Amino acid sequence: MDLKEQIIAEYLTQGCGFRKLAAKYGISRTTICKWVLIHQGIHNLPPTEKQSTYSTSSMNSSKKKLTSEQLQSAEALQQKIAALEKQLQWEKLRAEALDTMINIAEKDLNISIRKKPGAQQ
């Protein structure tokens, strides 16, 4: 068993914390955390009790009341996002129309308009 697997097993079975393991093995806490999360994802393991406690407590602490200025800013950003999505949709339609026009011109006029990949410049 290599060091990485040993650290992961120690975390999952003995319930040692990331800081304790980092101090014991001299590997950064974030690296150990990433190893454990990847291992759990690959093997479809549920989060440990520490992980679920931490994730729910951090979610509860992040719920803060927004000021009216922040609400207005968020609303303005939502409107801007909606406008940009409309613009993106319009540009996609425009690109499709231009592509169709090029296809028709190439077919009807029997000339190649598009640059061939790998062509000399």
Image: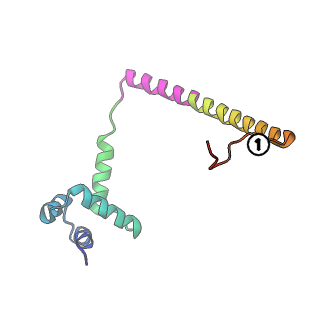
Height in image: 10 above or below 19? below
Residue 93 in percent (x, y) is at: 70, 35
Q: Residues within 10 Å of mark 1 (few under 14, many from 20)?
A: few
Q: Quadrant of the C terminus?
A: top right
Residue at 20 percent of width and 71 percent of height:
14
Height in image: 2 above or below 53? below
Residue 82 in percent (x, y) is at: 57, 30
Q: Which residue is mark 1?
A: 112
Residue at 52 percent of width and 26 percent of height:
80
Between 110 and 65, the one nearer to me in the picture: 110
**Farthest-out residue, left:** 24
Between 121 and 95, the one nearer to me in the picture: 121
Mark count: 1
Q: How is the image coloured?
A: rainbow
Q: Secondary structure at mark 1?
A: loop
Query: Is residue 46 in view from this perspective?
Result: no
Residue at 13 percent of width and 61 percent of height:
23
**Farthest-out residue, front:** 120
In the displayed structure, does residue 94 sit left or right of residue 36? right
Kind of residue indicated by mark 1: Ser
Q: Is residue 68 magenta?
A: yes
Query: Is residue 105 in view from this perspective?
Result: yes
In the displayed structure, does residue 55 sit left or right of residue 111? left
In the displayed structure, does residue 14 sit left or right of residue 63? left
Q: Quadrant of residue 46?
A: bottom left
Q: Is residue 20 magenta?
A: no
Residue 113 in percent (x, y) is at: 74, 39
Residue 20 in percent (x, y) is at: 15, 61
Between 22 and 63, the one nearer to me in the picture: 22
Question: Magenta stretch?
Answer: 66-83
